[in-house]
Image (cartoon, helix red, strand yellow):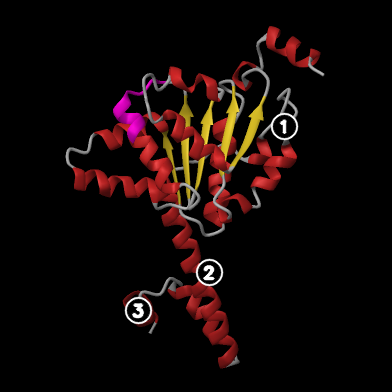
Amino acid sequence: MNDGLDRLVTLLGLRAQGDQVRELLAQANPTQVMESWLLLERHEREARNLESRTRNARVGTPKALADFDWRYSQSIDEALYEELLRLDFVTSGCNVLFRGEPGVGKTTLAKNLALRALERGHTVLFANLSSALADLLRQDNLPALERRLRRYTRVDVLVLDELGYQPADVGAVNLLFQVISRRHEKASTVITTNLCFKEWPSVFPGAACLTPLVDRFTERLITFDIGGPSYRQRDNPLVKKAVRAAP
């Protein structure tokens, strides 16, 4: 009987496990059993859906927000981040820019924002910007490129990490322009960078499309600036002294 139940659960593609079903069947009220079973099935399906979307999003396992030291940064807007976690920017198609020196927590905050979006049912993709551009450049024909572009343009939230650490050639910038343009006012793009906009030409030298790219990205933009030294240098005596001296 038990083995038969387990086989039926598997054959029907149900997400609940056999032992969970047997526990429900021990209840006396058939209606209550069915309601509990359906709720369990919904929970299991949602959990597996989230697991699948999280795996495809490639966010990884960032430092938990509970462990993020908000007091360490010399300038950071915790209230603004809490507002971002409400995900209104996603429903309105706004972009987000996390900007600050290396090591101040840009990637951690961007990844946790991506995880929150996943939890709320949105599709997400996290990628290092240089790796994403290299991925697009590897496509050797137009149909393959179009298919790969859809990977970056169809998700609700696209996170491009570390703009500014490696220069990109004109071909790569043209592809980034296509991604930003196709997502413009339709889906949210999150970028982390250590550069202000006037420094972006140093990463994309000679790119004629850079100005329209920035124009589209910034039209509906929330900027999250983080000031202060790298958290990875927190044990450096000079950094400790600078942090203590900060207002």
Between residue 130 and residue 2, name the one nearer to us: 130
On screen, 154 above or below 246? below
Between residue 52 and residue 151, name the one nearer to us: 151
On screen, 169 above or below 219? above
Magenta region, residue range: 166-174
- Mark 3–mark 2 Cα distance, whole angstroms, equals 17 Å
Residue 16 in magenta stretch: no
Q: Where residue 69 sits: x, y (%)?
A: 70, 31
Q: Residue at x 66, y 52 (%)?
A: 86
Q: Is residue 163 left or right of residue 235?
A: left
Q: Quadrant of residue 221?
A: top right
The residue identified by callout 2 is 43
Q: Residue at x 66, y 34 (%)?
A: 68
Residue 44 can be seen, yes or no? yes
The residue identified by callout 1 is 70
Q: Where residue 135 sits: x, y (%)?
A: 29, 36
Question: Residue 163 bears which disc, if any?
Answer: none
Question: Residue 12 bears which disc, if any?
Answer: 3
The amino acid at mark 3 is Leu
* Mark 1–mark 3 CB contact (< 8 Å): no
On screen, 117 above or below 163? below
Mark 2 nearby-residue class (10 Å; few <14, some 14–19, many ≥20): some
Between residue 174 and residue 33, name the one nearer to us: 174
The amino acid at mark 1 is Trp
Which badge, 1 or 3, is on the more N-terminal residue?
3
Which badge, 3 or 2, is on the more N-terminal residue?
3
Q: Where residue 156 sits: x, y (%)?
A: 47, 53
The amino acid at mark 2 is His
Q: Secondary structure at mark 3?
A: loop
Residue 26 can be seen, yes or no? no
